[in-house]
Amino acid sequence: KIENNIEKEIDNNRFFLEYQPVLDAKTKKIIGAEVLSRLNSENDGVLLPKSFLSAVNSVGINEKFDYYIFEKNCKWISNDKKQREGYKYTINFSRSTISEPEFVKKITGIAEKYDLKFSCLAVEILEDKNIIGEAKQQMIDNLSTLKEKGISILLDDFGKGYTSFGDLTDFDISIVKIDKSITQNAISQTGFLVLKNIIKTAKDLGFRTICEGIETEEHKKIVVDAGCDI
């Protein structure tokens, strides 16, 4: 049912955004937010991404959906740029969208349309599916170009699914996001050592790290002790 209606939901602008705060691990200050999409379905109420992203993939409208959400975010930031000055907003993109030849032109064009600085934006590489061959090279080139322009590049859900150590060498990224399954398992001694060594490896390679899924004071203390940045 969602697949049958998903494109119409986009055309009818039935999606809205929520902003998850991102904090500096040392200063504890908010330095930005991750942009989260929600669908206010006419028939089923508010749906989370786990309910509709598979439909987006199945119907094959990843690009349409990604650019739509990105533009909604840029428009929102532009409504009050003074208040949001200095924050960085992270938007998820599928690998198929990032590997599109026109990706850089479209992303920078939307940002310029709303008179936004590139430095306030970050592109997050989803772990949706693997990209190979010419498409992968195009993806590598696109990410490098965006980074040169000042847009940060994040690797999502490190340690889960398709996201692997190979991505650290393939893509010109700025920040590694460590999946919450790893951060939340760090309450055990073995889990803590795994997390600490992933963070160390990322830092040795010159990347900053974000720990996802921090929901308790215990989680927070553990990931800070392990050396995470954000």
Image: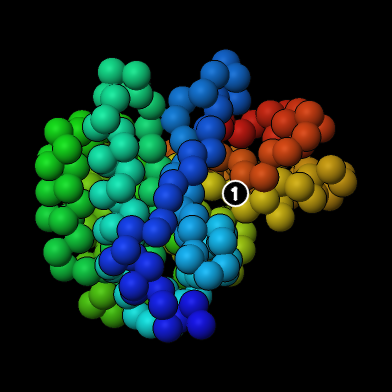
Residue 230 placement, left or right of 193: left
Q: Is residue 149 visible?
A: no
Q: Is residue 24 visible?
A: yes
Asked if 118 appears above or below 56 in the picture, the reply is above
From the top left corner, tell me how far across and down residue 9 is, in percent.
38, 68
Q: Which amino acid type corresponds to the residue marked 1 in the rendered image? A: Ile
In the picture, which quadrant includes the C terminus? top right
The residue lying at 46 percent from left, 25 percent from top is 31
Asked if 221 appears above or below 196 in the picture, the reply is above
- Which type of secondary structure does the marked residue at label 1 adopt? strand
Query: Callout 1: 10 Å neighbours few (<14), some, many (20+)?
Result: many
Q: Which residue carries the number 1 mark?
A: 178
Residue 180 placement, left or right of 78: right
From the top left corner, tell me how far across and down residue 36 is, in percent.
48, 49
The colour scheme used to paint the residues is rainbow
The residue lying at 17 percent from left, 38 percent from top is 114
- Front residue of this view, candidates 196 and 74: 74
- Front residue of this view, candidates 204 and 7: 7
The residue lying at 26 percent from left, 40 percent from top is 75
The residue lying at 54 percent from left, 19 percent from top is 29
- Front residue of this view, candidates 45 and 18: 45
